[in-house]
Amino acid sequence: MRNLEISTYPDKGSWEDRIKFLLQFASFAPSTHNSQPWLCDIDRNICTVKYNHNIKLSESDPYNIYTLISLGCFVENLLIASNYYNIPTRINYIKKYNNLLDIKIYFGEGHTSHGNDNLFPYIMHRKNVRGEFKENIIDNSILRDIKELNVNKNIFLDIYTDKKDINLIATLTAKAIRIKYFSSSFRKEMSKWIVPSFSKRRTGLHGYSLRAPYLLSLVLPFLVRFFNLGTLLSKLNFQSINKASGVMIFSGDNNREEVVLEVGRLAERVMLYCVSKGLKTAIFIASLETEITKNKIKNCFNIDNPLFIIVFGKMDENIPFSPRKFIDDFVFIN
Ligand SMILES: Cc1cc2nc3c(=O)[nH]c(=O)nc-3n(C[C@H](O)[C@H](O)[C@H](O)COP(=O)(O)O)c2cc1C
């Protein structure tokens, strides 16, 4: 459980205090390599969420697709939290020339009931799991509810529970990881995000979250940088995906930033819903990162524009939560 008391919401406080409180929940969103690529400006009742340009993932995210998805997850948490505390919100996407879009959220305007506040308590419980799932069949009613969470006609969500399909995603993910780890520039970038378990750093992938033993985590950044661990990592990823109960593939037009951002929002809602049903989720996007594996996904599943992949199922684990930045490290008051 994360250490944030729901009952400490400052309902008599200023907009600044209230929005800052809500932003703590938003920051529990998942992000590529736990990079937390968000910055927020608060100006009275308006909070602008933007991309933090200091975070560059030129090898893992050259087109900023995963940054936008991370921002989408963050915004969805923020809106679910506002809804829970009965604060109406209005949201506006602002496209800036040569830049990723800004998301402006007006608190105290618009409406509250986008029907998600029952997901609020699960924001603090969701974590990206790694390891083997337990074989388990998911109830059809849960699969139907997940599909119904998608109310955006520009986004498609396909769910596969057939063992053959799950095995194909596991195989393509393993192949893509082998290809990516062949590149020394990819390994160099990756190694900067891997952090020994004991480190006080508040971003990145700590050894424990990767299930690396404590001592191994000390040298893991070095090993990733200077040795090709692709074969080993592809095996571990294969084992994890192959036993999952299902795979969800999100798709939509990747040339439209607002569509990619909305994929992130939907994905967060779906992950929180899974948590509410006692399921664990794990994000695996490697198979979308190489042309050859992405094309296989397009052809085999008949999906035009796959953007994001999550697997889900039951898993016994008690790995600590990944850390998050302090609020004052990403929130600025105008
Ligand atoms: C856009 C995106 C892509 C991700 N890709 C992967 C991935 O390919 N493999 C993986 O193990 N985790 C992936 N993750 C999960 C992040 O590593 C994880 O969210 C982050 O470390 C924070 O941990 P938490 O989600 O448990 O809080 C991804 C997350 C996002 C938002």
Image (tube, grey):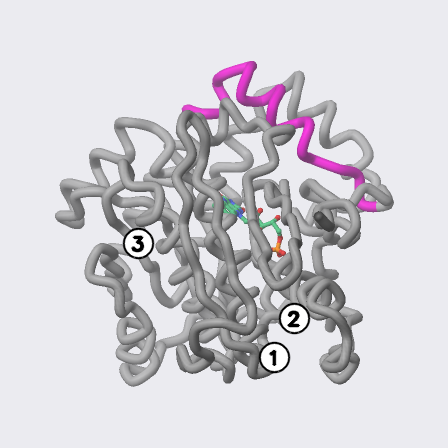
Tag on residue 121?
A: 1
Residue type (three-letter) at the residue carrying disc 2:
Met
Residue at 56% x, 68% y is 107
Disc 3 designates what residue? Answer: 250
Disc 2 designates what residue? Answer: 124
Report the mark closest to the observer, 1 or 3: 1
Q: Position of residue 136 (x, y in %)?
A: 41, 75
Magenta highlight on residue 317: no
171 left or right, relative to 225: left
Q: Name the element at disc 1.
A: helix
Residue type (three-letter) at the residue carrying disc 3:
Phe
Q: Position of residue 179 (x, y in %)?
A: 41, 24
Q: Position of residue 269 (x, y in %)?
A: 44, 68
Q: Look at the picture and state if 72 lies above or below 276.
A: above
Q: Which residues are magenta?
A: 179-197
Q: Look at the picture and state if 187 lies above or below 288.
A: above
Q: Look at the picture and state if 269 lies above or below 260.
A: below
**224, 65: nearer the viewer:** 65
Residue at 28% x, 61% y is 163
Q: Are marks 1 and 2 in contact (CB under 8 Å)?
A: yes
Q: Residues within 10 Å of mark 1 (few under 14, many from 20)?
A: some
**Quadrant of image for the N terminus:** bottom right
